[in-house]
Amino acid sequence: MKNQELGNWQTTVLGIVLAILVIIVLNSYIIINPGQAGVISILGKARDGALLEGIHVKPPFITVIDVYDLTVQKFEVPAESSTKDLQNLSARFAINFRLDPIKVVEVRRKQGTLENIVSKIIAPQTQEAFKIAAARRTVEEAITKRSELKEDFDQALGDRLDKYGIIVLDTSVVDLAFSPEFARAVEEKQIAEQRAQRAVYVAREAEQEAQADVNRAKGRAEAQRLLAETLKAQGGQLVLQKETIEAWRSGGAQMPKVLVMGDDSKNGVPFIFNLGNVQNQP
């Protein structure tokens, strides 16, 4: 009986020991997945050196592992500023960023969670970067030169977030808004510019058409001059004969009923006599 009780007690103790060993083993390592980094804290103190992907051994029960996502994160952040001409300008930026794995431990010590990073670091620094970019130009320039505004904003934001271990990959302007009064002023100015450009185009078109008329008139005058000189020169009668025959062939003139022959010269122009009367004679 005593041996049976001793055996049961030993089995229980062995089971407890094995359970404790299993718990210790399970709490003695951590697996960091690709795209992640871990920060190990022992008794509340963060240890230098981030844990990158793979399996890592850690002291059981007295350590805490904070795992950070190193993949690209995207957040939309609003911002407001005054332009160079003291106009109110508001925008909303979509910011793509990721954490620098080398500085993850520093991020854990100073900023904590990803939510704190967005609310306490990225949002206020976005506001300051937008103020820098907007103050360099008027509100009209901010609209017409939007790409330049974005370049200045990207430069300012990247410089400010780099020291916090935040790498800015890309930004985009989701929305850019200004006062309704200025919107109407810009629209009216654009309409006026379009009308002015249209007036210039019409004036140039009229000038070109007038020049074309002049050139056509000069061409007709030159043709008439050359024709007159040709008629005056020797052989001018042949020209008249040729034009007369071409007119008859093309149907532009009726065949005369009267043909009057000129002199015996080969270059004489035929004149008209009544062919109809000759055809009607028996």
Image (tube, rainbow, N blue to C red):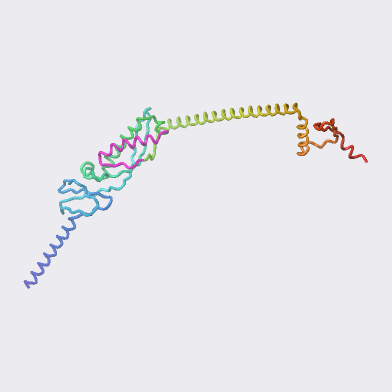
In the image, 273 versus 145, the foreground residue is: 273
Tell me which corner region of the image, top left, top right, bottom left or bottom right, holds residue 108: top left
Q: Which residues are magenta?
A: 144-171
- Side (left or right) of 148 relative to 275: left
Q: Position of residue 119 (x, y in %)?
A: 28, 41
Q: Position of residue 178 (x, y in %)?
A: 40, 33
Above or below residue 108? Residue 136 is above
In the image, 16 versus 69, the foreground residue is: 69
Q: Is residue 264 magenta?
A: no
In the image, 23 versus 256, the foreground residue is: 256
- Side (left or right) of 134 relative to 57: right
Task: State the quadrant of the C terminus.
Answer: top right
Tell me which corner region of the image, top left, top right, bottom left or bottom right, holds residue 2: bottom left
Residue found at x 19% / y 55%: 29
Q: Position of residue 53 (x, y in %)?
A: 24, 52
Task: State the quadrant of the N terminus.
Answer: bottom left
- Side (left or right) of 98 relative to 62: right
- Outermost residue, left side: 2
- Outermost residue, bottom side: 1
Residue found at x 19% / y 49%: 40
Above or below residue 50? Residue 250 is above
